[in-house]
């Protein structure tokens, strides 16, 4: 969810020169010198004007793209920018990103025009920072345009992570920094019926095109619609969209941003909109999906669709940022799986007491129980291998997911902060699926330090310092982000092992290492199955046989794994392939830097580059090494 304060300004450079003095008498030598000087000056002026021209055009193109996206999607803007005025956005109409086939066509055309405009620029005349952004944007636009040609292949109402569960979370976490934010929030809430109606229209068009969503998935979404918002909870005033709204208004009251009367009016409006707009919107969506349910449409992978394999190839690039051919990815995963399996075997053979301790249930408790203690320990242990956050430390609070959403949320997640407000950070723990002990420790590493929170704050502050163009915020790289979170999660298993040893828990320390390898093995297996289902067309029966071969024999578990991967293509790969790409990038850095390599230096390189696709990261690493070699 997938976003802290500084204004962004585009620097405009002005040429300044001395006036040419006139002389009444010039020698031939002086005249020749003057002509050469004038020609040289003229050429330099043309060069600098051309340079400036391309920079200005790039600034204009990226600014237009950024502004249009922010003004058309208030949710995205709010989670990206704390103060839109600082980015030149003063007047906008609060709006949700409703599906509209006509707008989709216009958007496609707009992206085509933007790509054409970008391709007319001379990248050698851009600054290094802009040239890198140009590369990222053109590659992203090219792949986005390819994806948009596959109508109705995406699924915005996935039971696992669809809009029906995401919208209320985003509304509940919609920060109120000013009275305008409250009014924008209420305006968005008032559009919930139009938003869900547009998604229902998409599902209807999808079914009419012969690409119906499986009946069991639509039924699951319908059941969610019946429980996420209920009349009983709204009448009792206990729904999380009521309680969180009251809490946020209270903060504005304390800050003097609103009056008591304002608060009363806003509370009444919120309750009215929840009961007369949001609740009926969920009801209408559920009723509409009921009419589309067809039990004859069974869960299958993208490979079963007419152009599903081609769509999957582009989706893989979009989700992971990896441009490797799928066959190469399979080989990479297979090799990693074998390596993890061997490490597990070695560990168990060398320390048979691990299995005995598991079987007897004699393991000691993890040294820390409190999330704050764990986060502090992680920050301490990461210090030598990771750069400090630019401009100092930051604050983080750990919150519980509302009971209304526990069933539909991940065990934990981090809400990204805006580009211009990186200091108020929250990690959410799902109490129904609460990880404890070692699981909680590595989860906090994944979501907090050195994971998502640390990475997000680092980039936002660095981007403000370097005056990165805000259009960079339009680019999303799941593999870069989730691959990093998984990369540091695996490091956290090692941190935990050392922590346990420090407390005299040697067996538990070995088990922490074992758990790390086991999690890697599991994610690798699921990533391979993702390719089997969505690219090779593996059936449920074939997947069941693979899982049974690895000891997963419970039919409920097999069905759950299969359905989740069908619903969320490339999701496991976003994490695990992203992790493997980072490991590969790290090995290349070791080779290129030689004795100058350190984990600290590599982490600085990765974080300083910011969210990117891995092809661009590989090219940047090689280019910087070449420049350093030439300068030596």
Image (cartoon, grey):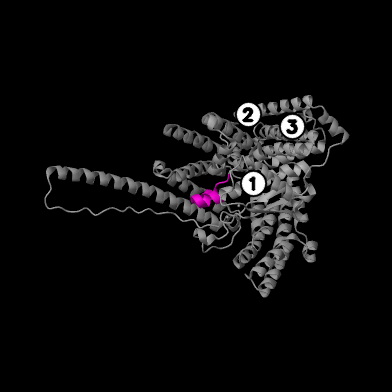
Bounds of the magenta segment: 461-476
Image height check: is 31 above or below 7? above
Q: Residue at x 69, y 26 (%)?
A: 338
Q: Quadrant of residue 443?
A: top right
Foreground pick, 456 / 125 = 456
Foreground pick, 287 / 317 = 317
Which residue bears the numbered disc 3?
Answer: 543
Q: Is residue 470 magenta?
A: yes
Q: Are marks 1 and 2 in contact (CB under 8 Å)?
A: no
Q: Residue at x 73, y 48 (%)?
A: 373
Left-right relation of 223 to 89: right
| Crowding at mark 2 (Cα within 10 Å: few <14, some 14-19, many 20+) | some
Q: Which mark is residue 193?
A: none
Foreground pick, 316 / 451 = 451
Q: Are marks 1 and 3 in contact (CB under 8 Å)?
A: no
- Residue 419 % position (x, y): 56, 53
- Residue 567 % position (x, y): 70, 42
Residue 306 appears anywhere in the view: no
Left-right relation of 467 to 517: left
Query: What kind of element bears circle 1?
Result: helix
Q: Choose mark 1 or mark 3, whichever is in front.
A: 1
Image height check: is 470 above or below 340? below
Q: Quadrant of the C terminus?
A: top left
User: Which label's residue is closer to the chain start, 1 or 2?
Assistant: 2
Image height check: is 113 above or below 553? below
Query: What kind of element bears circle 3?
Result: helix
């Amino acid at each position: 969810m997938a976003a802290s304060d500084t204004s962004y300004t585009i620097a405009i450079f002005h040429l300044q020169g001395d006036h040419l003095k006139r002389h009444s008498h010039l020698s031939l030598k002086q005249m020749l010198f003057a002509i050469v000087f004038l020609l040289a000056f003229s050429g330099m002026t043309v060069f600098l004007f051309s340079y400036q021209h391309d920079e200005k055009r790039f600034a204009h193109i990226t600014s237009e793209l950024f502004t249009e996206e922010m003004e058309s999607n208030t949710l995205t803007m709010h989670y990206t920018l704390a103060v839109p005025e600082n980015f030149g956005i003063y007047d906008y109409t609060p709006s949700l990103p409703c599906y509209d086939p006509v707008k989709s066509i216009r958007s496609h055309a707009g992206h085509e025009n933007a790509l054409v405009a970008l391709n007319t620029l001379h990248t050698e005349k851009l600054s290094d920072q802009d040239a890198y952004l140009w590369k990222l944007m053109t590659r992203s636009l090219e792949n986005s345009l390819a994806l948009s040609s596959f109508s109705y292949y995406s699924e915005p109402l996935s039971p696992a992570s669809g809009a029906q569960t995401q919208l209320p979370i985003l509304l509940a976490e919609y920060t109120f920094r000013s009275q305008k934010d409250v009014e924008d929030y209420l305006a968005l809430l008032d559009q919930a019926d139009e938003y869900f109606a547009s998604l229902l229209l998409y599902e209807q068009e999808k079914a009419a095109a012969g690409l119906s969503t499986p009946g069991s998935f639509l039924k699951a979404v319908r059941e969610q619609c019946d429980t996420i918002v209920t009349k009983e909870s709204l009448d009792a005033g206990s729904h999380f969209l009521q309680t969180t709204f009251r809490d946020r208004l209270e903060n504005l009251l304390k800050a003097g941003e609103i009056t008591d009367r304002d608060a009363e009016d806003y509370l009444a409006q919120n309750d009215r909109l929840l009961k007369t707009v949001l609740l009926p919107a969920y009801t209408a969506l559920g009723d509409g999906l009921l009419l589309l349910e067809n039990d004859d449409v069974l869960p299958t992978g993208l490979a079963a669709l007419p152009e599903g394999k081609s769509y999957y190839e582009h989706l893989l690039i979009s989700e992971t940022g990896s441009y490797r051919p799928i066959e190469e990815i399979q080989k990479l995963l297979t090799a990693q799986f074998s390596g993890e399996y061997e490490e597990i075997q070695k560990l168990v053979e060398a320390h048979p007491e691990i299995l005995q301790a598991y079987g007897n249930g004699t393991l000691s408790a993890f040294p820390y129980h409190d999330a704050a203690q764990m986060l502090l320990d992680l920050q301490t242990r990461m210090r030598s291998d990771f750069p400090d956050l630019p401009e100092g430390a930051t604050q983080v609070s750990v919150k519980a997911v509302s009971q209304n959403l526990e069933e539909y949320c991940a065990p934990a997640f981090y809400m990204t902060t805006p580009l211009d407000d990186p200091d108020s950070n929250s990690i959410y723990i799902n109490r129904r699926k609460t990880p404890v002990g070692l699981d909680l420790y590595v989860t906090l590493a994944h979501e907090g330090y050195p994971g998502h929170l640390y990475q997000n704050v680092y980039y936002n502050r660095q981007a403000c310092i370097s005056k990165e163009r805000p259009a960079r915020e339009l680019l999303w790289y799941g593999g870069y982000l989730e691959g990093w979170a998984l990369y540091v999660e695996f490091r956290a298993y090692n941190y935990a092992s050392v922590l346990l040893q420090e407390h005299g828990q040697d067996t538990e320390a070995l088990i922490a290492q074992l758990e790390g390898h086991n999690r890697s093995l599991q994610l690798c297996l699921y990533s391979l199955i993702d390719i089997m289902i969505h690219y090779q067309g593996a059936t449920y029966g074939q997947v069941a046989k693979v899982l049974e071969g690895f000891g997963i024999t419970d039919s409920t578990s097999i069905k759950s794994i299969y359905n989740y991967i069908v619903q969320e293509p490339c999701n496991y790969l976003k994490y695990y392939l992203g992790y493997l790409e980072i490991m590969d990038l790290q090995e290349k850095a070791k080779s290129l830097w030689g004795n100058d390599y350190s984990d600290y230096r590599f982490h600085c390189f990765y974080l300083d580059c910011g969210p990117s696709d891995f092809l661009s990261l590989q090219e940047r690493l090689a280019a910087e090494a070449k420049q350093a070699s030439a300068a030596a």
